[in-house]
Image: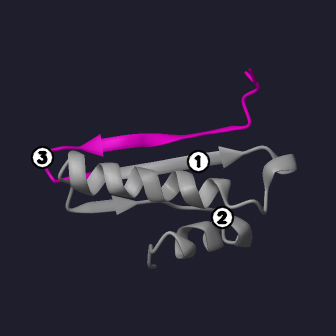
Amino acid sequence: MYSDVIGRSGFVSWRPEYGLAEIGYALGSPYWGRGLATEAVRALLRFGFDVMKLNRLEARCNADNTGSERVMQKAGMTF
């Protein structure tokens, strides 16, 4: 059984009074380009909207981090 950590994802802030949360994610470079971050973000979005009943989910990245920007776009997020 594997136990290596390849990255992380989760809610970095939550404002229940506004129905708002921010998600964050990081993935080790050997695992980039496999769709893993996109899969994690999609799962967070589903959980946030379906289970937590949020109105809005946000994420951010550095302007030069086009890979992270693409992850958000593929997961259906808009700027």
- In the rendered image, residue 34, in percent from the top left (x then y), is placed at 75, 59
Residue 48 falls inside the magenta stretch: no
Indicate which label's residue lies in the foreground, 3 or 2: 2
> Farthest left residue?
17
Labels 1 & 2 near each other (Cβ < 8 A): yes
Magenta extent: 1-20
Q: Is residue 19 left or right of residue 64?
A: left
Q: Secondary structure at mark 2?
A: helix
Q: Secondary structure at mark 3?
A: loop
Indicate which label's residue lies in the foreground, 1 or 3: 1
Q: Is residue 24 left or right of residue 54?
A: right
The residue that label 1 is drawn on is 25
Tell which of 59 and 34 is nearer to you: 34
- In the rendered image, residue 67, in percent from the top left (x then y), is placed at 72, 68
Of mark 3 and mark 2, the one earlier in the sequence is: 3
Q: Which residue is found at the position 25% from the left and 57% from the top?
A: 49
Q: Which residue is found at the position 87% from the left and 48% from the top?
A: 30
Tell which of 68 and 3 is nearer to you: 3
Q: CA distance from mark 1 to mark 2?
A: 9 Å
Q: Is residue 35 left or right of residue 33?
A: left
Of mark 1 and mark 2, the one earlier in the sequence is: 1
Tell which of 57 and 15 is nearer to you: 57
The residue that label 2 is drawn on is 68
Residue 14 falls inside the magenta stretch: yes
The residue that label 3 is drawn on is 17
Q: Is residue 42 left or right of residue 2?
A: left
Disc 1 marks a residue whose amino acid type is Tyr
Q: Is residue 44 shown above or below 66?
A: above
**Which quadrant of the figure contains the N terminus?**
top right
Q: Secondary structure at mark 1?
A: strand
